[in-house]
Image: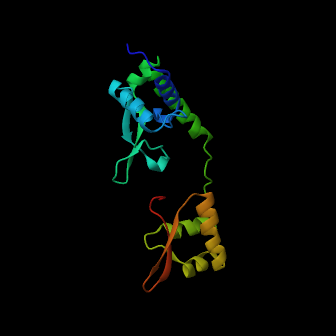
Amino acid sequence: MTKLTETQSIILSTGALRPENIALPLPKGLAGAAAKMAVGKMIEHGWLQEVDANLSRGEPLWRETGDGHGTTLVVTGAGLVAIGIEPVVVKTMAAIRDHAAEASAPKLPTPRAGTKQAVLIEMLQTAEGATMDAIVAATGWQAHSARGAMSGALGKKLGLVVTSAKEDGRGRVYRISRDNA
């Protein structure tokens, strides 16, 4: 069995505690050529692996690949074994963390059926969308109130993405993005 340096042990131990076993950021003071050398040796041993970074989740970058993407470092099963952790234990802990995060995540409110807000959502979910004149006629709201409802109640409280586009013959048409439907 290969003996770990203090730096290698710190990188693997902290990575094992992070979601997805991400090894970044590296310990303070480890940068440049020293970081490349340490990480290179750990990759050779199979303790770390470079994987595509998911930038939408804010995963830290190890290096940029030049095509607008980047890689991050994760601790492998062999890296976990090297510090005395069974990979099954880490996966169980990750599942417990994920469950706790889901349980504590705020629940988005759902609109009551038959309300003006429900009518607005129904109109905006159709493929043809709705013009401001149609929204005002259906809800009885002033135009500024309808825009406020789309921004505040639908956008901020319900997390829906309302888009608008000018269309020939109709003017500005509002829709709820298909990603939300």
**Residue 73, relative to residue 133: is it above or below?**
above
- Of residue 43 and residue 76, the one placed in the foreground of this image is 43
Residue 169: quarter of image: bottom left
Where residue 21 sits in the image (x, y, percent)?
Answer: 46, 32
Q: Residue at x 44, y 19 (%)?
A: 4
| Residue at 53% across, 35% down | 98
Asked whether 91 or 58 is in front, the reply is 58
- Left or right? Give the position of 66 relative to 91: left
Q: Position of residue 140 (x, y in %)?
A: 65, 77
For image coordinates 36% across by 31% down, the residue present is 40
Q: The N terminus lies in which quarter of the figure? A: top left
Residue 146: percent from the left, percent from the top? 62, 73
Colouring method of the image? rainbow
Q: Is residue 113 visible?
A: no
Left-right relation of 148 to 31: right
Residue 179 showing in the rendered view: yes
- The residue at the far top in this view is 1
Q: Count of labels shown?
A: 0
Q: Is residue 145 above or below residue 31?
A: below
Q: Residue at x 58, y 38 (%)?
A: 101
- Which is nearer the eye, 154 or 87? 87
Query: How far from the left and from the top, in percent, is residue 20?
Result: 46, 35
Q: Is residue 108 above or below residue 170?
A: above
Give the farthest residue toward the front. 33
